[in-house]
Image (spheres, helix red, strand yellow):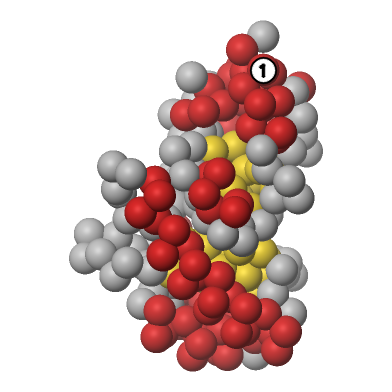
């Protein structure tokens, strides 16, 4: 089975890093094959797509939101997701806290950082990370676990190293004070570089399902 082979090859290169299967556009059947091959976390980009899959996969796999989250979608997100990797502002964090309080749920989150400060990408700026970390640490229903970044789209993945290194520096600076454990960075074309630069979690879609 190709999915099983792909997952095995990827895990060989991950060391201690956690594998999240990015399942945007993938069928429930494909995801079930990945689960059978050892995947226990999936990352979804779109709320409505995740809602449909959740009907069939609830209890079988952990759901992470890895796409941009609009505040008007927060209520539905906190109902079905187990982690939100894309918190990028104080108002969004506040909204998540409010909606979680209504259903008495504590939501683990990552702060998404736009490390290359690209105008067409979401995520907070590097200098905004510490104030956001400080704010989230005071919330009662949101539990900050770490940081996430996409990294710029570059033709040579080696050129991503400086960005991943900068993320690791930010992570290291905040890790002890705020008890951070997750640095989510690296995708299908860049995960090996990301792991070498300190990623504890990678999000891979194409390399699993190709």
127 vs 35, nearest the viewer: 127
Look at 59% across and 54% down and name the residue there: 196
Q: How many marks?
A: 1
Relative to 93, 159 lies left or right: left
Relative to 19, 194 lies left or right: left
* Quadrant location of the N terminus in the rendered image: top right
Where is mark 1, residue-wise? 5
Q: Position of residue 206 (x, y in %)?
A: 47, 29
* Label 1 CA crowd tier, 10 Å (few <14, some 14–19, many 20+): few
Q: Is residue 38 above or below residue 169?
A: above
Q: Quadrant of residue 12?
A: top right
Look at 76% across and 50% down and name the residue there: 16
Q: Residue furthest left?
A: 119
Q: Position of residue 118 (x, y in %)?
A: 25, 64
Look at 74% across and 80% down and name the residue there: 179
185 vs 136, nearest the viewer: 185
């Amino acid at each position: 089975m190709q999915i099983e082979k792909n997952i095995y090859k990827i895990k060989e290169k991950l060391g201690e890093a956690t594998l999240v299967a990015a399942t945007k556009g993938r069928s429930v059947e494909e995801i079930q094959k990945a689960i059978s091959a050892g995947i226990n976390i999936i990352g979804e980009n779109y709320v409505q797509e995740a809602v449909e899959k959740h009907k069939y996969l609830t209890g079988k796999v952990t759901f992470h939101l890895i796409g941009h989250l609009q505040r008007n979608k927060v209520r539905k997100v906190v109902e079905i997701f187990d982690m939100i990797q894309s918190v990028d502002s104080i108002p969004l964090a506040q909204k998540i806290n409010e909606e979680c309080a209504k259903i008495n749920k504590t939501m683990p989150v990552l702060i998404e950082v736009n490390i290359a400060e690209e105008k067409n990408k979401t995520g907070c700026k590097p200098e905004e990370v510490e104030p956001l970390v400080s704010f989230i640490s005071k919330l009662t229903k949101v539990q900050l676990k770490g940081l996430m970044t996409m990294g710029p789209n570059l033709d040579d993945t080696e050129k991503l190293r400086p960005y991943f290194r900068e993320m690791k520096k930010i992570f290291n600076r905040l890790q002890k004070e705020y008890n951070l454990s997750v640095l989510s960075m690296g995708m299908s074309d860049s995960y090996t570089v990301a792991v070498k630069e300190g990623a504890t979690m990678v999000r891979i879609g194409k390399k699993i399902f190709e």
